[in-house]
Image (spheres, rainbow, N blue to C red):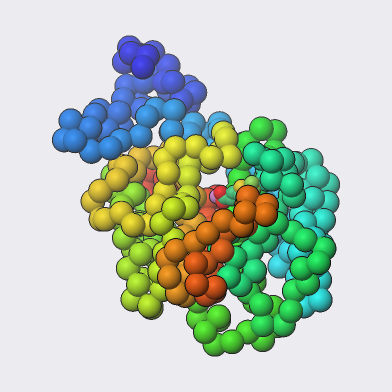
Amino acid sequence: MLKLGRNDPCWCGSGKKYKQCHEMIEQRIWQYKRQGHEVPRRDMLKTPAQVEKIRASAKVNVAVLDYVAEHIRAGISTEEIDRWVYDVTTSMGAIPAPLNYEGFPKSVCTSVNDVVCHGIPDPKEILQEGDIINVDVSTILNGYFSDSSRMFCIGQVSPEREKLVRVVKECVELGLKEVKPWGFLGDMSQAVHDHAHANGYHVVREIGGHGVGLQFHEDPWVGYCGKRGTDMLLVPGMMFTIEPMVNAGTHEVWVDENNGWTVRTGDGSDSAQWEIQVLVTEDGAEVISW
Ligand code: MF3
Ligand code: CO
C-alpha cells in the first residue's frame, strides 16, 4: 500500500491533505487490525467521487423497480418483467447488469414462491393471484453498479406468505440499523438471523450479499450467520448489499441442473428476499438503492 506523507493530498481525491482526511480513519483501522480483527482494504473504501457515480446508477435501479411495482399483476409473464427492465434501463442510458453476466441470459432475476434467487424470466411463467415474487434489479451506469431487490405479492396472498414477505423486510431493516462505522459486519448478520429464527424461518447460508459499486460483486462477502462483534470492521466508505434469502422451511437449497441458475428451497417451501445497497457513512449508514 502506498505510504502517504501527512501533507500529501489524500488518496480519496477529496482535495484535502491526508492528515486532514483519511489518516485518522486508517490509524484507527490499523488498531483494530493489530487486535486481530478483519478490516477492509483501502480499495474497499469508496471515494466521494465514486459514491456520486454510484448514486446516479442507483437512481436508475430504483426507477426500474418503481416501474415494476406499478405494473406487476396477475396474468403477466416473468418474461414481460424482463422486457420492462431492459426497456426502462436502456431508455435511461444504462445497462442491465445481469444480462450476459457469467452467461445469465436475461436482464433481471425473477424468483417466484419456492425459488430462492436467480430465477430466469420465462414467457411460459405466468404470475398467478397468491404468488410471491422477488424482482432483483442491477444496473450499470457509466461503469458504476447498483443492485437491489423487492418482493411483490400478487393479488391476495395467504397470511403465511404475507408474513414471510413482511418478516424478511423487517430482517433487512433490523440489519440496516446495525450498520455504522466501527461496528462489525457480524452485528448486522446476527440481527438478520435472530429475527428470521424468532419467526420460525431459516436463512440460506451458501448465498449472501457482497460489496458493490465499482464492480457487480466485490469483497466483502456478506453472510447472515455471523455473530455480533465478529467479521469485518465497518468503516466509512464501505458499500455492500444486505440481501438475506429466508426460507419458511429448511435452510437447504439446490440449483436447477437444467439451466445452472435457478435456486430452489430443498423442501419446496416458500422463500423471500429483499436487497438493499448500503453505504457506511461517518455517523451511520445511507441506503443507496432499494
Ligand atoms: N442480483 C444478484 C445479486 O443480488 C446477482 C444476480 S447474478 C445474475 O447479487 F447473473 F443472476 F444476474
Ligand atoms: Co446483490
Image quadrant in which you'd find residue 249: bottom left
Q: Position of residue 234 (x, y in %)?
A: 34, 43
* Residue 85 appears in view: yes
Q: Image check: 201 left or right of 164?
A: left
Q: Position of residue 161 (x, y in %)?
A: 55, 80
Q: Is residue 245 above or below residue 45?
A: below
Q: Which residue is pictured at 57% across the width and 56% down the height?
A: 255
Q: Which residue is pictured at 47% across the width and 52% down the height?
A: 207
* Residue 67 appears in view: no
Q: Which residue is pictured at 67% across the width and 82% down the height?
A: 130
Q: Position of residue 125 (x, y in %)?
A: 77, 68
Quadrant location of the C terminus in the rendered image? bottom right
Q: Is residue 290 above or below residue 145?
A: below
Quadrant location of the N terminus in the rendered image? top left
Q: Position of residue 41 (x, y in %)?
A: 37, 29
Q: Which residue is pictured at 77% across the width and 61% down the height?
A: 122
Q: Image check: 233 left or right of 220?
A: left
Across the whole image, how many numbered discs are drawn on residues? 0
Query: Along the line of sight, which residue is nearer the eye, 209 or 177?
Result: 209
Query: Along the line of sight, which residue is nearer the eye, 105 or 289?
Result: 105
